[in-house]
Amino acid sequence: MSLDPVRCPDCLASLKRSHALAVCEGCGATYRENAGVLDLIGSKSELNASEVEVQDRVSAFYEDARYEKAASRKYHDHTLDVLTRLAPPSGTVLDDGCGNGILFEYVRQRGLVVDSLYGIDLSIGMLKYAKKRHESVRGANGEVLRADAQRLPFADATFDVVYARSLLHHLPDPAGGAREMARVLKPGGTLVALDPNRTFLSALPRLLARQGEHFDDDHKNFALSELVGLLGPDLSLEHIEFMGYLAYPLLGFPDLLDFGRVLPLDALAPALLRIDELLARVPVVKRLAWGVALVAKRR
């Protein structure tokens, strides 16, 4: 049996790999590199081409604004602080829907140690940045791949930890994406899924935002009960963490609305993040968060 956990997305058989090519040892499908990343979109995937186009287009906005401006980057690093507290990265780790790969940079900057670190995304635009960040992580095996989150190209029970940051609400079949994450988790492995939390405060702003060029029609806004319902029978909910109040709209998304043009956000960021932490502890109020993270274990 191959030690490489990467598999054919169509039949989950092992791949025979050489340089920029991979051939399935089961069904014979051939996969090639695209922009230096192995493209593992199989024939059984039904992709939303519009969503892929949107993500390719916004990757540069993310890189040049969302992850470049100091206050915004502080917010996103703080989010990763929370997620890695909920499930410390260890063993074999997957960033499902890795985007531009800021988790990889975070792992390097924090000196975190993992055995293997993988990332997948549909967007080649995003993966160009993710590949560079992944290569900067010393000592970690693994790679970034172009893949469909609803047909993950990995063997069963591969990962100790799976992070899914703002992934499920982009998928045509979110429940299918959750089933795939459960499949590739080891028994007892941990999933942390962060997604929008629909409330009476967030519903209208998100509806208006969807009219912009940064969002596709597949973009969803989950109520907490809907998100919990996606976990299915193979994942056991362990914890719910509400997160994102004032800092979320003010700091997190300068590519959409740059409040830094009128507010001294670099100076305000630490206080805004602290206020968010306090609000997350207040009963009733905490449920009005813009986002919610679910921590679940593979049964």
Image (cartoon, grey):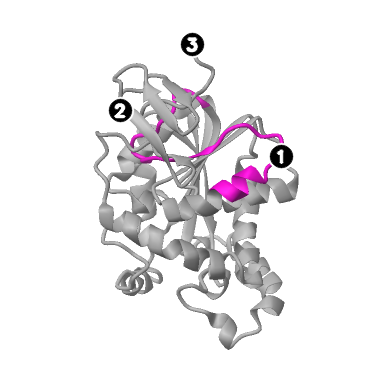
Sequence-first tag of 2 and 1: 2
The answer to whether residue 163 is visible is: yes
Write down the residue under mark 2. 10
Answer few, some or many: residues within 10 Å of disc 2's Cα (few below 14, many 20 plus, some between 14 and 19): some
Label the magenta part by its dominant secondary structure.
loop
In the figure, 64 relative to 28: above or below?
A: below
Q: What stretch is highlighted in magenta?
A: 131-158
Q: What residue type is labelled 3?
A: Met
234 or 72, which is in the foreground? 72
Q: How far apart are marks 1 and 3 (CA)?
A: 27 Å
Q: Earlier in the sequence, mark 1 or mark 3?
A: 3
- The residue pinned by badge 3 equals 1
Q: Which amino acid does label 1 sit on?
A: Arg
Residue to which mark 1 is pinned? 138
State the separation of the CA atoms marked 2 and 1.
32 Å
Q: Distance between the residues labelled 2 and 3?
A: 18 Å
Give the image location of residue 97, x and y in percent.
Answer: 45, 47
Residue shown at the point (50%, 52%) measured from the top left? 128
Position in image of residue 223 (x %, y %): 35, 56
> Which residue sits furthest front?
19
Categorize mark 1 by other alpha carbons within 10 Å: few (<14), some (14-19), many (20+).
few
Label 1 SS: loop
Q: From the viewer's perspective, is residue 92 above or below residue 280?
A: above
User: Which is more toward the observer, 286 or 15?
Assistant: 15
Q: Judge whether residue 299 can be spotted in this image.
A: no
Q: What residue type is labelled 2?
A: Asp
Query: SS of the residue at dot 2?
Result: loop
Residue for point 50% across, 30% down: 19
